[in-house]
Image: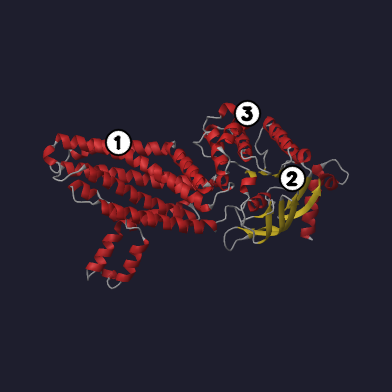
Amino acid sequence: MSVLLEGVSKHLGARGKKKQVLHDLSLVVERGEVFGFLGPNGAGKSTTIKLLLNFIRPDSGRITVLGRRVGAEEFRDRIGYLPEFPFFYDHLTARETLLLSGRLSGVSEPTLGERIPLLLERMNLAEAANQRVKGFSKGMKQRLGVANALVHDPEVLIFDEPMSGMDPLGRHLIKTIMMELRGLGKTIFFSSHILSDIEALCDRIGVIHKGRLLYAGGLQEFLQGTHDLEARFVAAINEADHAHAA
Amino acid sequence: MHTLRSLYHLTLSTCLEGIRHKALWAIVCLAMLLTLGNLAVTLLFTWDLGKVSIEFGLSAVAFTGLLVVFFLGMKMLADDLERSRIYLLLSRPISIWQYLLGKFLGLALILLTATVILGVSAAVSMQYVLWSYPAFVPPHFSWLTYVMALFSQWLGLVMVLAVSVFCFSFASQPFVALLLTACTYLAGQNMELLRRVVLENAYAGVLSGRESLVIGLSWIFPNLSLFDKKYAAAYGLAFSGQELLLLTGYALSYSLLLLWLAAFLFKRKELA
């Protein structure tokens, strides 16, 4: 398996005002799978991703990526990460940004020399290759973020809201790239609250609400014969809220 | 090997980002104006023009260096956290100490660049004053001492930079880190004086009899007054290579110790 979370709990916040944001979360993402992590705002999607990358540490539970224990063993050269709001060094150019990331991931100079122009071309950023990132639009930054996640040809991709703030053309581009990556056998773990993206791309989904995993499994099983993911998702959230209130 | 390569690339990118930053050039322009102001200020004096010019030139370099540490260096570090840029780096196989050391070395290089530009600029104005008023050239003035004083000032600034990285590693807000660094700088500038007052003076007020406390504090705070060689440069006083070597050793060991502590504290920080 590519990603494993076992009984993960997490509190966040200032001392004395800590709030539990994840409750005993267990999740498996198999190799070569596109896994959509679905949930309303504040459900715990980004927190889960930050735990996977060891930016924050779990209070309890176990997390492994590609069989390596997060926080104890190195695995980051084999994953590509796209944050929800990718921020770059304003005064570096797009090419320099990708060079830095590739070099830090241990990619050789000749490989980077070949790969970076191709990636920039694929992301429609070839003309902006030598422009400083400061002048980029949000969509351009998001596309650069995707290129940045792919520059070292990782096995596992972790995308936090990859289509956030993109225009329809940009969203279409990212979706197409994610489908290509699936064809190449890459594992993709991505969070989103845009249901149409989840429907179009995922093999399996996980639904999280208020830090609790409500569902993990195949998309068709979740739909339970209906064709309306939105209605099914809203029903699942409402059921959880009612169960919690009761 | 990969560790050193990563460190090199982090250093280089930090330096490049800082050098291209408008703030750095604004500070350098300001300092060049200050250095040119050296000519105007020096001419207000009727004697010791050479000494005034040298002290003013070196003070301008030190002042600008502090601006670089406080307003460029700390801003770059704060932006990494506040704008989540740190994710860009820490999602790569680099450790916290590599990140902090890379940032520190990159910023130290920016400081060196600014010191060299300003040092040359100050030297031009000083040369003009010394050439125009040969009667006021300090008897043992040497350009070598001036360069050594400049290097020594840079070492002092590097220590302040290390303090800023250390404060940044545990402070909850960048403003708190800035405040703590500024306080440490002020304490560091006056620690030697305080130590001497307490140890050599039986009437040291509330600190009388608390020599061990003051000695302890003098080991904690950086002794920045040691790096202030303006007086030596202006009066052409002896300033040996051995002393400079000791200062370099002190600055490096103090900075590395602080960076080690910073890495330890930063590891415990949650990048939520």
Image mark 1: chain? B
Residue B33 disc label: 1
Taking the image as shown, residue B238 lies to the left or right of residue A56, namely: left
**Residue B179: % across, % down:** 41, 54
Q: Residue furthest right?
A: A225
Q: Nearer the viewer, mark 3 or mark 2?
A: 3
Q: Nearer the viewer, mark 3 or mark 1?
A: 3
Q: Residue furthest top?
A: A127
- What amino acid is labelled 1 in the image? Leu
Q: Earlier in the sequence, mark 3 or mark 2?
A: 2
Residue A121 disc label: 3
| Disc 2 packing (10 Å; few <14; some 14–19; many ≥20) | many
Q: Which residue is mark 2?
A: A36
**Residue A216: % across, % down:** 78, 51
Q: Is residue A87 visible?
A: no
- Secondary structure beneath dot 3 equals helix
Taking the image as shown, residue B252 lies to the left or right of residue A244, namely: left
- Split into 4 quadrants, where in the image is the C terminus of chain A? bottom right
Marks 1/2: CA–CA distance:
58 Å
Q: Is residue A182 visible?
A: yes
Image mark 3: chain? A
- What amino acid is labelled 3 in the image? Glu
Marks 3/2: CA–CA distance:
27 Å
Labels 1 & 2 near each other (Cβ < 8 A): no
**Residue A179: % across, % down:** 74, 36
- What amino acid is labelled 2 in the image? Gly
Q: Nearer the viewer, mark 1 or mark 2?
A: 2
| Disc 1 packing (10 Å; few <14; some 14–19; many ≥20) | few
**Residue B181: % across, % down:** 40, 54
- Secondary structure beneath dot 1 equals helix
Please tell me which residue is depicted at 73% across the width and 52% down the height of the picture.
A209
